[in-house]
Amino acid sequence: MNVTGMFGYLLMYAAAGYLAVCLYQLNRFVLPGMLVLYGVVMYLSSEFEVKSPSLQVIRFFEEEMSFVLFLLKVIAVTAILLFGVWLVTRNQEVSS
C-alpha cells in the first residue's frame, strides 16, 4: 500500500466519522442505535455461520488488484458518505 492508498482510506474514514457525528447531533439516539444494530447483525452472522458483513466490506477494498479501481471505489464511497452528510445537514440553521 502506498501513500495514495493510505490517503484514500483516511479520507473515507474521515467522511464516515463526519457522517456519524452529524447523525449524533441530529438525534442523540441514532448513533447508539446504529451501534446496537451493528452488534445484533454481528451476533446473528456468527450464530448462523454467515460471512461477517464487515469482512465483506473489507474484502471489497482489500482484494482489488487495480490501483485505479481501488481509488474509484474509495472516491465513490467517500462521495456517498459526504452526500449523506449533506442530506442530514441541509436544513439545519447555522448558529453562532
Image: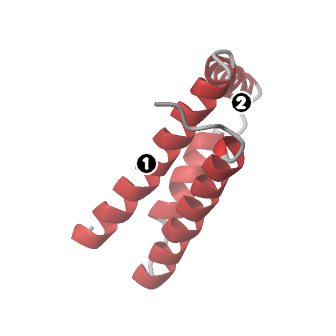
- Vertical placement of 96 versus 83: above or below? above
Residue for point 45% across, 55% down: 12
Task: Name the spot of residue 3 as percent of width and height, x first.
Answer: 22, 68
Residue nearest the observer in this picture, 22 or 11:
22
Which residue type does callout 1 highlight? Answer: Tyr
Residue 71 placement: quadrant: bottom left
**Image quarter in which the N terminus is found:** bottom left
Q: How many circles with numbers are drawn on the protein?
A: 2
Residue for point 53% across, 57% down: 59
Residue receiving disc 2: 45
Question: Farthest residue in the front direction?
Answer: 96
Question: Farthest residue in the left direction?
Answer: 3
Residue for point 72% across, 37% down: 50
Which residue type does callout 2 highlight? Answer: Ser
- Vertical placement of 6 versus 43: above or below? below
Q: Is residue 5 left or right of residue 29?
A: left
Task: Name the spot of residue 21 as percent of width and height, x first.
Answer: 52, 32
Which mark is in front, 2 or 1? 1
Neighbour class for label 1 at 10 Å: few (<14), some, many (≥20)? some
Alpha carbon distance from label 2 to label 1: 24 Å
In this rendering, does residue 51 appear at all?
A: no
Residue receiving disc 1: 13
- Vertical placement of 71 versus 60: above or below? below
Task: Name the spot of residue 81 as percent of width and height, x first.
Answer: 60, 53
